[in-house]
Amino acid sequence: MINAVFYSDQVISANEKVDIRLTKLMRERGRRIGYVPSGPDPDLWFYSEKRAYYARQGLDLDIFYDLDRDHDSAERDALLACDAIHLSGGNTAAFLARLRRSGMLDRLRNWANDGGLLVGTSAGAILMTPTIAVDALFSNKRPEDAKDSAALDLVPFEFFPHVQAKPSYLPDLLAYSTWNSRPIIACPDGDGVVVADGVVECIGDPFWLSNGSVERVRETALAALRP
């Protein structure tokens, strides 16, 4: 059964409620989190920031898995032995390409389907859904026109982060929802989604878009959506 935590943004105090849910899930598993960056981080600046963030919650971000270099089976096994794996924010399309090229897309999908806990921020969260099509909006394109966008496909909805950042995002997503059969959860920074034990739980006040309609989902567990 899929277990996943979706952050719109992460290293901000507004995420406290999402953080609490994550730490509760981690207490049932352990403290070790592996980190998969979306792209180059030669000075480990982003990794160090995230490591300090998790340390404040009593969690250990102790493996940095660079998709741009070759790894032996022992290194891959060490990542997949972590109690959770964090997928960073960044360029979603480039991240997806790196996952495919490294062979990790299928490995992470299998690991998650076997009960592993994935944590995604922004691009990393989008990647946990069936497609990264909504990412097209960040470059002023249409999700309907997205090609070769299939992602990890772990949940039956799409996820859009940072919806508060631009007034056009919500109407554009609403138009896309009339073309797309899957619901879309659009999150402002500070809100999130937790999938655990077959239940999709919206944290905060995200938007729920489906078939051309939109509503706010306030602190609601959506048991009907079972990955």
Image (tube, helix red, strand yellow):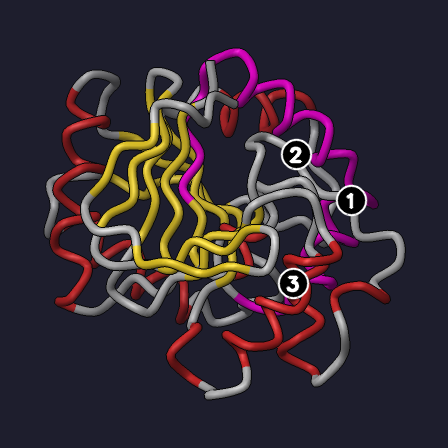
Q: Nearer the viewer, mark 3 or mark 1?
A: 3
User: What residue is shown at x 30% (from left), y 61% (from top)?
Assistant: 10
In the foreground, 173 or 21: 173
Which amino acid type is shown beneath numbered disc 2?
Answer: Asp
User: What residue is shown at x 38% (from left), y 79% (from top)?
Assistant: 164
Question: Which secondary structure dominates the residues rendered in magenta?
Answer: helix
- Residue 96 in the image: above or below residue 129: below
Q: Which residue is mark 2?
A: 153
Secondary structure, mark 1, is loop
User: What residue is shown at x 13% (from left), y 67% (from top)?
Assistant: 13
Q: Which residue is mark 3?
A: 134
Which amino acid type is shown beneath numbered disc 1?
Answer: Ala
Tell me if label 3 and label 1 are in contact, CB under 8 Å: no
- Residue 19 in the image: above or below residue 137: above
Q: Position of residue 215 (x, y in %)?
A: 37, 58
Q: Residues within 10 Å of mark 2 (few under 14, many from 20)?
A: some
User: What residue is shown at x 40% (from left), y 71% (from top)?
Assistant: 45
Earlier in the chain: of badge 3 and badge 1, it is 3
Secondary structure, mark 3, is helix
Q: Which residue is mark 1?
A: 150
Q: Position of residue 84 (x, y in %)?
A: 38, 30
Tell me if label 1 and label 2 are in contact, CB under 8 Å: yes
Q: Residues within 10 Å of mark 1 (few under 14, many from 20)?
A: some
Which amino acid type is shown beneath numbered disc 3?
Answer: Val
**Magenta span of residues:** 90-119
Q: Position of residue 163 (x, y in %)?
A: 43, 73
